[in-house]
Amino acid sequence: MTLYRDSALVLRTWRLGESDRIVSMLGEKSGKIRAVVKGVRKTKSRFGSRLEPLSLVSLLCWKGRELDVVSQAETIELFRETRKDLDRLYKANIILEATEQIAQDGYPEPELYKLVVRVLRVLEADDPQMLLGSFIWKLLALQGYRPQMSVCAVCGVTGSRAGFDATAGGALCEEHAHGRRASTEALDVIARSLDGQLAEVLRIENSPVVAETEALALRALEVVLERSLRSVRSSIIRH
Ligand SMILES: [Zn+2]
């Protein structure tokens, strides 16, 4: 077996038998990592407690055929402020779950790693209102999801944008927006997030467009993943 070293964000953990645990992580160089941590619940385990979700660690792992085995882990960052604040923790859990779902096994995704770690650091420092919505749009764009934003996704007419439907594939004109209306401001934020204008979008505050953008983003994520996220409160995804 070969050893490798990487920085990794812990996304999720599962129990494995009496004392072991499986940890799903996003590695800076490795992409998604699934590794076994042996003897987590024994008091002797030196690093088991460092491998909790929302921990950034420096990792030494044995490469396995299906699951790797963690040999050493040292904490880089714990995101303490986020852990202390229920609202931030809620957003962080959605970010971790969406990343876990969207990252592919055995495939390096350095851009995804960069985006997720950056967004978690912004959340830790500041908690801007637009963070979750814009993150999800950027995440979807990174995975190749490109909704039609300048023409109606149903009829192709240019100009008036009156609605949005992730299943239809993007913005909708006045005629096709029925029951799927979206504000021009929200559509503008979506288009800018997809374009990577994250810093600008994060400056938007106290706007009704925040909740709308977030709800549309979570709906689009559901469509792309073909399932809903367990971290999302059911009340806010219905749009
Ligand atoms: Zn149309």
Image (spheres, rainbow, N blue to C red):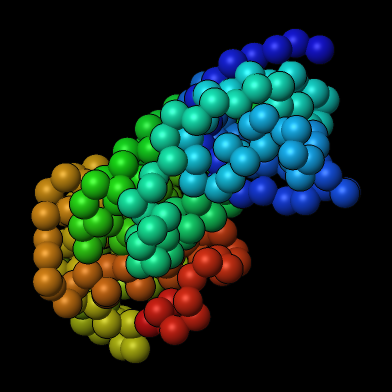
Horizontally, residue 134 falls left or right of residue 58, namely left
Horizontally, residue 163 falls left or right of residue 207, namely right
Task: Let me know if residue 122 appears in the view.
Answer: yes
In the displayed structure, would residue 230 be above or below residue 239? above
Give the percent coordinates (x, y) of residue 170.
Answer: 34, 64
Quarter-wise, where is residue 128 in the image? bottom left
* Along the viewing direction, whichever of 56 and 43 lies nearer the viewer: 43
* Along the viewing direction, whichever of 87 and 156 lies nearer the viewer: 87
Horizontally, residue 14 falls left or right of residue 89, namely right
* Quadrant of the snapshot with the N terminus: top right
Which residue extends farthest front?
A: 43
Q: Residue at x 44, y 84 (%)?
A: 235
Quarter-wise, where is residue 160 in the image? bottom left
Give the percent coordinates (x, y) of residue 94.
Answer: 46, 60
Which residue extends farthest right?
A: 17
Which residue extends farthest bottom?
A: 179
In the displayed structure, would residue 145 be above or below residue 216? above
Task: Let me know if residue 153 appears in the view.
Answer: no
Q: Residue at x 76, y 27 (%)?
A: 69
Give the percent coordinates (x, y) of residue 41.
Answer: 76, 44
Q: Residue at x 62, y 41 (%)?
A: 49
Q: Residue at x 70, y 12 (%)?
A: 3
Give the percent coordinates (x, y) of residue 138.
Answer: 33, 48
* Quadrant of the snapshot with the C terminus: bottom left
The number of callouts visible is: 0
In the displayed structure, would residue 181 be above or below residue 217? below
In the displayed structure, would residue 135 be above or below residue 178? above
